[in-house]
Image (tube, rainbow, N blue to C red):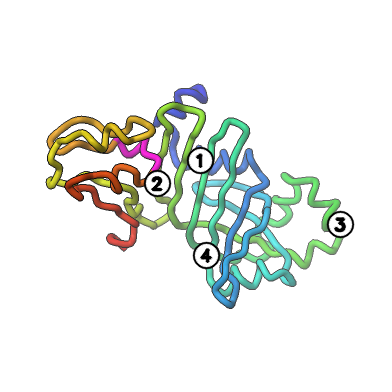
Amino acid sequence: MDQQTKKKGNMDVQDYFEKLRDIRDTSMATTAEDGTPRVRIIDTMLVENEKLYFLTARGKDFYHELMRTGFVAVTGLNQDWETVRLWGKVKNIGKDRLDEIFGKNPSMNGVYPGDSRDILEVFCLYEGEGEYFCLAEHPIVRHSFAFGKSSYHRKGFVITEECIQCGTCAEVCPQGAVKEGCPYEITQENCLHCGRCFEQCPASAIIHRTGMEEA
């Protein structure tokens, strides 16, 4: 299967994880003890069976934030304008897979040579939700998914039965993601989630799903 075909909807969850591995230098976000956000560039070391593995040292704030909250958010952008985002639960697996990670990421030997690697511990992102977003296509392509035992919480905008079929939403959509109908319908995989249709609908027939409604 070629890359262009996969962009059109045939990628599975593992494909999205592999894209993060290819990007490698990803941004990972946590929450500090005072509730403010923190983000770092962290290497994606391994991906396997819809799980993502990375490591950090026990002395770092990142380590303590992961241990305290048990959550992380990850995102990366490649040169083809494809973004993959993951957010969910992490667990510390200690030294498990540490030697394998160093074997597959030899540059780590220069950062933590010899026995100094004993300060490192491995974390696994094993359950959560994600999104693939491609700006290189027109209209844009968005795919959302869940992994592990998590369920996907639908987000974005939906046109309800209150629609008066005036066509305003279709006219103002920058990606042409609204189809005529009764009611009109938003093609979710092409929607920017910008909210322009929501703001300009004269009948207030569009609702904004935040994902919290189904949590």
Q: Which residue is mark 1?
A: 16
The Cα–Cα distance between marks 2 and 4, rounded to whole angstroms, is: 17 Å
The residue wearing badge 3 is: 113
Callout 1, which amino acid? Tyr
Q: Quadrant of the C terminus?
A: bottom left
Q: Residues within 10 Å of mark 2 (few under 14, many from 20)?
A: some
Q: Are marks 2 and 4 in contact (CB under 8 Å)?
A: no
Per the rendered image, the range of residues in magenta is 187-192
Q: Residues within 10 Å of mark 3 (few under 14, many from 20)?
A: few
Identify the amino acid type marked 2.
Answer: Phe
- Indicate the secondary structure of the residue bearing disc 2: strand
* Mark 1 vs 3: CB contact within 8 A: no
Instruction: From the top left corner, tell me how far across and down residue 104 is, in percent.
Output: 72, 44
Distance Cα–Cα, label 3 vs label 4: 29 Å
Q: Is residue 134 above or below residue 131?
A: above
Residue that badge 4 annotates: 71
Q: Secondary structure at mark 1?
A: helix
What's the residue type where badge 4 is placed?
Phe
Give the residue displayed 79% in from the left and 45% down from the top. Answer: 106
Give percent across and percent down for residue 117.
79, 61
Read off the residue under disc 2: 145
Closer to the N terminus: mark 2 or mark 1? Answer: 1
Spatial CA span between label 2 and label 1: 10 Å
The amino acid beneath tag 3 is Pro
Q: Are marks 2 and 1 in contact (CB under 8 Å)?
A: yes
- Looking at the image, tell me whether mark 2 or mark 3 is earlier in sequence order: 3
